[in-house]
């Protein structure tokens, strides 16, 4: 996480910075406050039986295209919403809204990641009782987003074929945090010729990660079934966990 560029300070937490002067104290308080808010967000999702997924990748890896194809694939079988993070513009949010899905735009300004405070504010604009899955499309960046808990249940990291198969080795924090790695733009594998999916997965395994790896193309829909089955299975698990937690609270 970059501690000197100012990306730790976002519109959602800048009030904390104003209260603390020492840089170490600021960073410590920012992360503690973020984690507290993240736990609150997660409890909110759990209470409504909603699965929250944090999508992370470098810029242009295909997060929004994946969401568009996912919405089309499920149709009315699942109810989605998207929280969009970008420094500026509502371009991606508008693409999602065109699919008939609510999209809440978060403009981060100079911050190169979302934080839990931003996500909490966006939740007030969503009716979680009407949703099954909330995707949080994080700012395109392979460094900072992995360091901030947003209250999500799962992290999905996209690795697009034009980026190179060595990215898990070069950005270990990001890929170690992944519960699923999607090799996106797989339709370009034959064209590029220098991206080895096996090598990319080997780098992931060297991080002691057992996350599944799927090759996927939003252009051709290749691999979309595997992704959809993974998503459905984890939604079922989340709902089972939410029911169990509710039962424990009633017995407490």
Image (cartoon, helix red, strand yellow):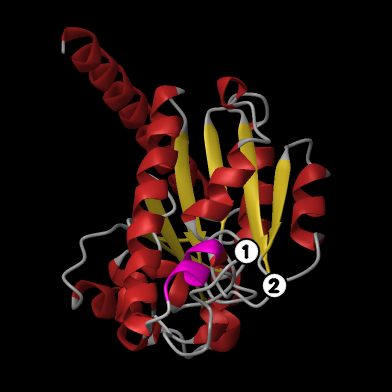
**Would residue 229 be found to the left or right of residue 104 on screen?**
left
Q: Which residue is mark 1?
A: 11
Dots 2, 1 in contact, CB < 8 A: yes
Q: Residue furthest top?
A: 251
Dot in front, 2 or 1? 1
Disc 2 and disc 1: Cα gap in Å?
8 Å
Q: Quadrant of the C terminus?
A: top left
Which comes before the other along the chain, label 2 or label 1? Answer: 1
Out of 58 and 31, give the one closest to the viewer.
31
Q: Position of residue 38 (x, y in %)?
A: 40, 48
Q: Position of residue 232 (x, y in %)?
A: 43, 33
Magenta residues?
15-20
Crowding near pointer 1: few (<14 within 10 Å), some, many (20+)? some
Whether 242 is drawn above or below 85: the answer is above
Q: Which residue is mark 2?
A: 109
In what element is the residue under mark 2? loop
Whether 192 is drawn above or below 155: the answer is below
């Amino acid at each position: 996480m970059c501690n000197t560029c100012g990306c730790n300070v976002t519109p959602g937490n800048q009030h904390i910075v104003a209260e603390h002067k020492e840089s170490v104290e600021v960073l410590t308080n920012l992360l503690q406050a973020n984690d507290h808010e993240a736990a609150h967000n997660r409890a909110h999702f759990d209470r409504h039986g909603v699965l929250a997924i944090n999508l992370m990748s470098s810029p242009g890896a295909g997060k929004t295209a994946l969401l568009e194809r996912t919405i089309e694939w499920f149709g009315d079988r699942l109810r989605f919403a998207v929280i969009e993070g970008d420094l500026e513009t509502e371009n991606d949010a508008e693409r999602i809204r065109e699919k008939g899905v609510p999209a809440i735009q978060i403009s981060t300004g100079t911050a190169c990641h979302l934080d839990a405070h931003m996500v909490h504010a966006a939740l007030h604009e969503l009716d979680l009782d009407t949703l099954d899955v909330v995707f949080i499309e994080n700012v395109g960046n392979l460094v900072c987003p992995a360091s901030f808990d947003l209250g999500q249940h799962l992290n999905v990291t996209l690795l697009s074929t034009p980026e190179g198969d060595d990215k898990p080795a070069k950005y270990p924090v990001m890929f170690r945090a992944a519960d699923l790695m999607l090799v996106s733009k797989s339709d370009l594998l034959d064209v590029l010729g220098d991206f080895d999916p096996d090598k990319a997965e080997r780098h992931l395994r060297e991080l002691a990660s057992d996350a599944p790896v799927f090759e996927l193309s939003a252009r051709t829909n290749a691999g979309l079934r595997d992704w959809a089955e993974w998503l459905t299975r984890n939604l079922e698990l989340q709902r089972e966990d939410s029911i169990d937690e509710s039962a424990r609270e009633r017995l407490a």
